[in-house]
Image (spheres, grey):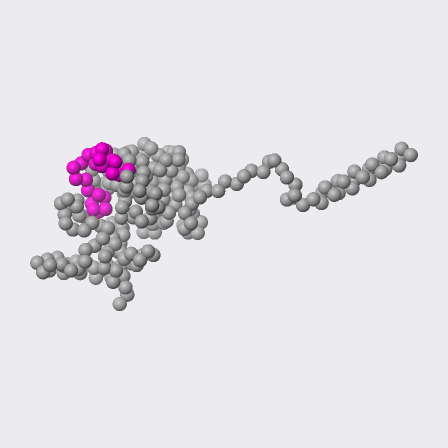
Amino acid sequence: MLRKINYVIAISCFAINIAFAQIPPEKVSTQTDKQKVTVVVPSATIDGKINLIEGRVSLVYDGDTISVTTKDGKIYSIWLKGIDAPESKQNYAKKSRKMLADLIEGKDVKVIVYKKDLLYDRYIGMVYFNGEDVGLRQVETGMAWHYKQFAYEQTSEERKLYIQTEQKARTEKIGLWEDSKPVAPWEFRSGKKTKDNDDEPTATTESSSNTPASNSSSSSTNQNNKSARTYILGPRGGCYYVSESGKKVYVQDKSLCVKP
């Protein structure tokens, strides 16, 4: 009798084990599952692969350009989106670089990539250190300008914040705003003076060819320069050419971008 009971129990346990083994894996709950963390990045990815760069700042070139080395040894050149720092021969160039170096050189940062600058083989993006927008910090300390020429690449919130931050630095005469007439880097690169001393248009746009007769000589020179340039129609409908310094210069006459 006892043998029969043991036999029945053994058969029952075997049947239970078989039934449990047949339960699909997704039906078995576990407490060790970890929730996936999603990083929000711009919808337009770069090269179809790169939209977030994480690594250590291995070099600070100037007040708006750095190198980031990732854990796998790859090195990326990054231009901080939204700002333009003084050029090497301008006032505050060294101070701007030092400010940026003191803040992030040798530190781990995250770069949310916006796009790739094919001309200089570098990435343009927002750089964050301990959650702080490094580019905005440069503007706040008066070590860089808000790059208004490319403000359209920023969100409305970013533009508003950068504009307000620069205005505050101007009002309080912080950093480069201590100078009575600081020259914007894009004006310095194009060889132009400040707006206060020069009636020529800034590097953002180019004046039309309708000039007074007294300026016919300069008008002729401008036309010759225009004919030698290659004009590009941007994805947003803007017409521009690339200057010798590698910067986009937008023109008002969009017919220049229309093929004859």
Rendered image quadrant of residue 9: top right
| Quadrant of the snapshot with the N terminus | top right
Image position of 32 (left or right of 137): right
Q: Nearer the viewer, residue 68 or 204?
A: 204
Could you tell me what secondary structure mostly forms the magenta stretch?
A: helix
Instruction: Give residue 72's position: percent from left, percent from top.
Output: 45, 41
Image position of 26 (left or right of 235): right
Instruction: Give residue 234's position: percent from left, percent from top.
Output: 31, 56
Whether residue 60 is visible: no
Residue at the farthest right position: 1
Image position of 149 (left or right of 106): left
User: Could you tell me which residue is drawn at 27 percent across and 34 percent down?
Assistant: 141
Instruction: Give residue 99's position: percent from left, percent from top.
Output: 29, 33
Q: Is residue 93 above or below residue 44?
A: above
Residue at the farthest bottom position: 260
Whether residue 237 is visible: yes
**Tag count:** 0
User: Could you tell me which residue is drawn at 20 percent across and 49 percent down?
Assistant: 202
Image position of 206 (left or right of 49): left
Rendered image quadrant of residue 207: bottom left
Tell me if residue 187 is in the magenta stretch.
yes
User: Could you tell me which residue is drawn at 46 percent across and 42 percent down?
Assistant: 39
Q: Nearer the viewer, residue 29 or 45?
A: 29
Q: Magenta segment, which residues?
A: 165-190
Q: Nearer the viewer, residue 89 or 215?
A: 215
Residue at the farthest left position: 214
| Quadrant of the snapshot with the C terminus | bottom left
Instruction: Give residue 162's position: percent from left, percent from top.
Output: 30, 40
Rendered image quadrant of residue 225: bottom left
User: Could you tell me which residue is drawn at 31 percent across and 40 percent down?
Assistant: 161
Tell me if residue 177 is in the magenta stretch.
yes
